[in-house]
Amino acid sequence: MAAGRKARVQDVHDLAMAMPHVTRLPGSQGRPVYQVGGRSFVFFRNPRPDAVDPVTGERYPDVIVFWVGSQADKEALVGDENAPWFTTPHFDGHPSVLLREADVGRLDHDELAEVVQDAWLARASPSRARAWLAAHGLPSTEDSGRA
C-alpha cells in the first residue's frame, strides 16, 4: 500500500481537535494540552532533562506525548527501529510514547491519525469510546481486545 502524504505538526492539532468532546488547554509555557473528559491524551511537552540530544546534551524543545492503550502498544511503537517514536526512563511504566515535532514528517498522515485516535480512545470514557468506534464501524474495545 502506498504511503499517504507526510504528516505535519499542524496535523497533530487538527486530528486531536477532530475527536469528540475535546478541550484544548494552554499548558505550561503555552504548550497545548488536548483532553477528553478532563483527561490528557496528547500534549506538547516543555523541554525536560530526560529528553536530550545525545550529541549535544541539549534538551529537546519539541516533544509531544501521546497516550497509548497498553504497554504492548507502547512496545510496538518504540520497538520499531524505522519509526520515530521513543520513550525515556521518566516514562517507564507510563502508557505513553514520545515524538519530536522535528520527526513528525517521518510518519504519514494516516499513521499519525491512528495514533491520535488511539490516544483519545485510551483516555475517553468507555461510553464515549464505544460511541466513537460504533460511528466509525469499528469493533468496541471489548470486541477487539483493546484496553
Image (tube, rainbow, N blue to C red):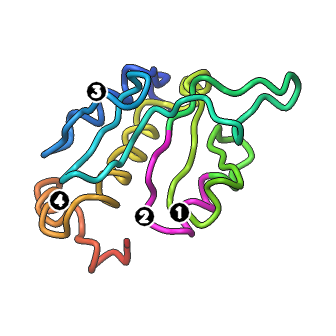
Q: Which mark is residue 69?
A: 2
How far apart marks 2 and 3 lie (CA) works out to: 21 Å
| Label 3, residues with CA under 10 Å away: few <14, some 14-19, many ≥20 | few
Q: Is residue 135 left or right of residue 120?
A: left
Marks 1 and 2: CB-CB under 8 Å? yes
Residue type at mark 3 is Asp
Q: Earlier in the sequence, mark 2 or mark 3?
A: 3
Q: Quadrant of the C terminus?
A: bottom left
Disc 4 designates what residue?
Answer: 137
**How many numbered marks have been drawn onto this rendered protein structure?**
4
| In the depicted structure, whether residue 114 falls above or below residue 112 | below
Point out the stretch of residues depicted in magenta: 65-77
Q: Earlier in the sequence, mark 3 or mark 1?
A: 3
Label 2 Cα crowd, 10 Å radius (few <14 / some 14-19 / many 20+): some
Q: Amino acid at mark 1?
A: Asp
Specify which label sits upstream in the sequence, 4 or 1.
1
